[in-house]
Image: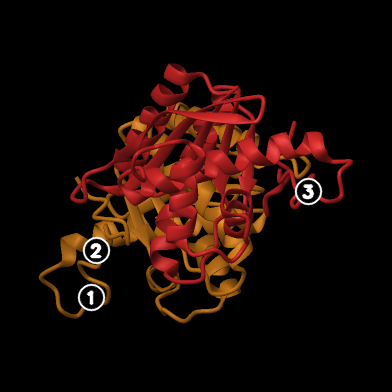
Chain colours: A red, B orange
């Protein structure tokens, strides 16, 4: 199955496309959607929605994974990010792609094996797990790849649900504050 | 000119449609877009975007006015509202409708003449200014009408720019945290 990981933003949207097959993952593509800073926000949102539709059309993923949104740091930037996230979710819904949401600690746990892992540990484990020669660039793309990887590894861990020794077993996150994302 | 006022939300979007002509405003229609609570958020966002497009197609407004978003009270709800606002802005942009943004105090100032007016004062002045027999229902629709009224009255006040005695002169808000909304 192809998994699309998304790191939402209104200036930069990171994306990562993985092929996941029997517990192994391969990076197909990663990159960013960027919108020009001088452009009015509504035009940037339309561009993000159109580019997302293009991405979904090109790779036809079986699942889209997005990180949960927290507003700890900058609420002003957060509003812009949430608005962009709205059009990203709408684009995936229109494409009929199931959406899964993970918290930052779930991503860290699934990729680095530790929910409080540092960012560079997550990046390095992303590189290793995918057998890449370098960490994907820029950071937004690398974050998106880690989120896709989290979904791939969380999904396969479902198969190990009966094994209590497997950390993270069954932590198959399909929740959102606005409602259940599963169908 | 027809002005569409919008009070964004993911459960309820309030809308108000005014005809504004030479300093006089008439209410054409107001109401709400509601999305079912049990439905996953992405499906609700798509519905809001589609219903907004329908509304824009039906009334072909010359301007859309939206209230600025603040996250003072409930950040969790705020994320959902901001996501809905994203698809609302995108729908207006696709329809080629210029978007104007006002702060709550600008709406209060323009409608009730006092930036710290209470909600019921704003509602009552909305009723009086439009010559209605009752305040529009529900609150979300009434709020949207007040926002449209704010735009109508802020726009006409531009004509009084040279009159320093006119309060609010030239306070023609086209700002957003994410960039200038004017074109």
Q: On the rendered structure, is B79 left or right of A37?
A: right
Identify residue for label 3.
Answer: A166
Q: What residue would you read off at disc 2? A: B157
Q: Is residue B132 visible?
A: no
How far, Cα to Cα, is label 1 from label 3?
Answer: 70 Å
The spot of residue A16 in percent (x, y) is 44, 35
Give the CA separation, mark 3 to mark 2: 67 Å
Residue A90: give x, y in percent of width and height.
53, 34
Do discs 1 and 2 belong to a common subunit?
Answer: yes
Judge if badges 3 and 2 mark residues of a common chain.
no
- Circle 1/circle 3 CB separation < 8 Å: no
Up-down: is B48 above or below B85? above
Pick whichever, B80 or A121, lies toward us: A121
In front: label 3 or label 2: 3
Q: Is residue A78 above or below residue B104?
A: above
In percent of width and height, residue B171 lies at 25, 68
Chain that bears disc 3: A
Q: Nearer the viewer, residue B73 or A164?
A: A164
Say which element carries label 1: loop
Could you tell me which secondary element the residue under label 3 belongs to? loop
* SS class, disc 2: helix
């Amino acid at each position: 199955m192809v998994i699309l990981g998304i790191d939402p933003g209104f200036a930069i949207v990171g994306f990562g496309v993985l092929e996941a097959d029997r517990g192994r993952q391969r990076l197909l593509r990663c990159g960013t959607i960027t919108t020009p800073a001088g452009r009015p926000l509504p035009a940037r949102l339309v561009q993000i929605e159109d580019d997302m539709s293009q991405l979904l059309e090109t790779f036809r993923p079986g699942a889209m994974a997005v990180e949960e949104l927290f507003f700890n740091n900058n609420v002003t930037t957060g509003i812009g990010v949430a608005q962009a996230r709205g059009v990203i979710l709408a684009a995936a819904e229109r494409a009929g792609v199931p959406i899964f949401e993970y918290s930052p600690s779930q991503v860290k746990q699934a990729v680095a094996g530790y929910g409080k892992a540092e960012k560079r540990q997550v990046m390095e484990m992303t590189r290793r797990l995918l057998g890449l020669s370098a960490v994907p660039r820029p950071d937004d793309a690398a974050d998106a790849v880690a989120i896709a990887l989290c979904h791939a590894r969380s999904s396969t861990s479902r198969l190990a649900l009966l094994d209590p020794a497997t950390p993270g077993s069954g932590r198959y996150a399909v929740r959102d504050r606005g409602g259940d994302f599963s169908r």
